[in-house]
Image (spheres, helix red, strand yellow):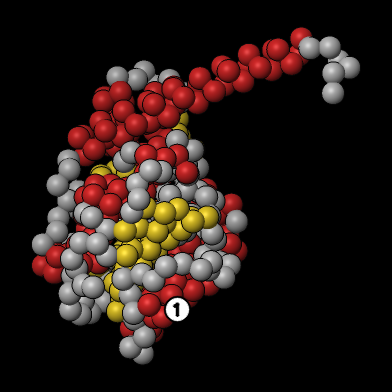
């Protein structure tokens, strides 16, 4: 089966922010989807709406461990890895193993099934770039021993594995280098600038800007990114290396925070915190290859995407508040209960 409807698609990391949005797009396109997730950072709630979908199956598994028995796949997407700095640094060895051991297991599965394999790589392979904007030809400037290395070097090693499988004729592969992505299903506790700034603004808390706020990023809305991923997977014929997927509109963190404050109408104050170690100073994708090979470019303007994200986070922040209130009531009831109760 090539690119028609009804493919059997395995999505590792399918319960995460990008993965769950990808599962939705694949189901809407008529495919059968098996989602594999360890729920390390992915969440079941992201897929609750697919529970009755006969073409969807959810399997709990960590790709670092031997894979469970899975149906044969035509396509394998590997999006399994913690991706925000606080989450991937919480267990750095596991992060590295996810990218190296986990990617190897999924490549072996793709080889056994004759499936096409797409690796979710990252703009982090460029590290703190000395070339701007970043084209796929740039080899990057990564600190191999710093706190970000578990993610950056893990993803770089995963790319190596993927292209070694391709060179050896063991699997047909695609590599997407994904730049900063935001949108609904991001976790409120993701620790990234978009989730932090929006949730802080909605809660009326201080907005934390790390460093001077003059460092730049380029933010891509999740629906654009998912469109890029599915186009990349469907593209027939050799690609000759990785493809950047991201929005080339670059802005400083201070500028992003100003937009968030305006759109939320929040009166939150901005506070400055130290810049994390090895935090890249600037980042913008050169998407010439994606444009030319896939006819892809992002469509969603920042303000439109941010409004949709604010609506999502407002629900998340609201339900967390409700839970806390319910918790307080239960705690109050417990406190009033007789001390001798078991
Ligand atoms: N950042 C910030 N405040 C926050 C979280 C992040 O100023 O509350 C900064 C961070 O130091 C970085 C930029 O925003 O310079 C983007 O960080 P994020 O974690 O979103 O993504 P990444 O660093 O992986 O690109």
Residue lying at the far top in this picture: please name it.
336
Which quarter of the picture shows residue 157?
bottom left
Is residue 136 shown above or below 190? below
Along the line of sight, the residue nearer the viewer: 1 or 165: 1
Residue 173: x and y, percent?
31, 76
- Residue shown at 54%/51% (left/top)? 40
Residue 51 vertical placement versus 320 (above, below): below
In the rendered structure, the answer to whether residue 249 lies left or right of residue 9 reads left
In the picture provided, is 225 more to the left or to the right than 94?
Answer: left
Q: Is residue 294 above or below residue 303?
A: below
Percent position (x, y) of residue 336? 76, 9
- Residue 163 visible to an observer of this rendering: no
Q: Left or right: 89 with respect to 130?
A: right
The C terminus appears in which quarter of the rendering? top right
Disc 1 crowd rating (10 Å Cα; few below 14, some 14-19, many 20+) is some
Q: Residue at x 29, y 43 (%)?
A: 252
Residue most extreme to the right: 340
Given the current orientation, which residue lies at the most extreme bottom position?
Answer: 168
Depth check: give the residue in front, 54 or 105: 54
User: Does residue 38 appear in the picture of this structure?
Assistant: yes
Residue 113 image point, x, y percent: 38, 77
């Amino acid at each position: 089966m090539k690119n028609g409807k009804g493919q059997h698609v395995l999505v590792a990391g399918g319960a995460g922010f990008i993965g769950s949005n990808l599962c939705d797009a694949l189901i809407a396109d008529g495919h059968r989807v098996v989602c594999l997730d360890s729920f390390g950072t992915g969440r079941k709630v992201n897929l609750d709406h697919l529970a009755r979908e006969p073409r969807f199956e959810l399997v709990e598994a960590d790709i670092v461990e031997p894979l469970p028995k899975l149906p044969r796949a035509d396509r394998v997407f590997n999006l399994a890895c913690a991706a925000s700095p606080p989450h991937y640094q919480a267990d750095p060895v596991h992060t590295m193993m996810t990218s190296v051991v986990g990617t190897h297991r999924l490549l072996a599965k793709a080889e056994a099934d004759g499936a096409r394999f797409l690796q979710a790589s990252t703009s982090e392979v460029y590290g703190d770039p000395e070339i701007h904007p970043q084209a796929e030809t740039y080899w990057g400037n990564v600190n191999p021993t710093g706190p970000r290395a578990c993610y950056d070097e893990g993803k770089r090693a995963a790319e190596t594995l993927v292209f070694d499988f391709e060179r050896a004729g063991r699997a047909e592969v695609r590599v997407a280098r994904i730049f900063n992505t935001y949108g609904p299903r991001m976790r409120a506790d993701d620790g990234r600038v978009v989730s932090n700034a929006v949730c802080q603004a909605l809660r009326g808390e201080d907005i934390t800007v790390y460093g001077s706020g003059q460092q730049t990023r380029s933010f891509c809305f999740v629906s654009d990114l998912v469109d890029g991923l599915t186009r990349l997977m469907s593209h027939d014929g050799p690609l000759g290396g990785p493809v950047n997927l991201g929005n080339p509109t670059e802005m400083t963190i201070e500028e992003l925070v100003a937009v968030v404050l305006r759109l939320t109408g929040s009166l939150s104050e901005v506070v400055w915190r130290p810049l994390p170690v090895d935090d890249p100073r600037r980042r913008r994708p050169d998407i010439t290859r994606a444009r030319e090979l896939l006819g892809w470019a992002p469509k969603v303007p920042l303000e439109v995407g941010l409004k949709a994200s604010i609506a999502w986070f407002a629900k998340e922040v609201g339900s967390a508040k409700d839970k806390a209130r319910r918790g307080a009531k239960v705690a109050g009831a417990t406190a009033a209960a007789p001390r001798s109760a078991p």
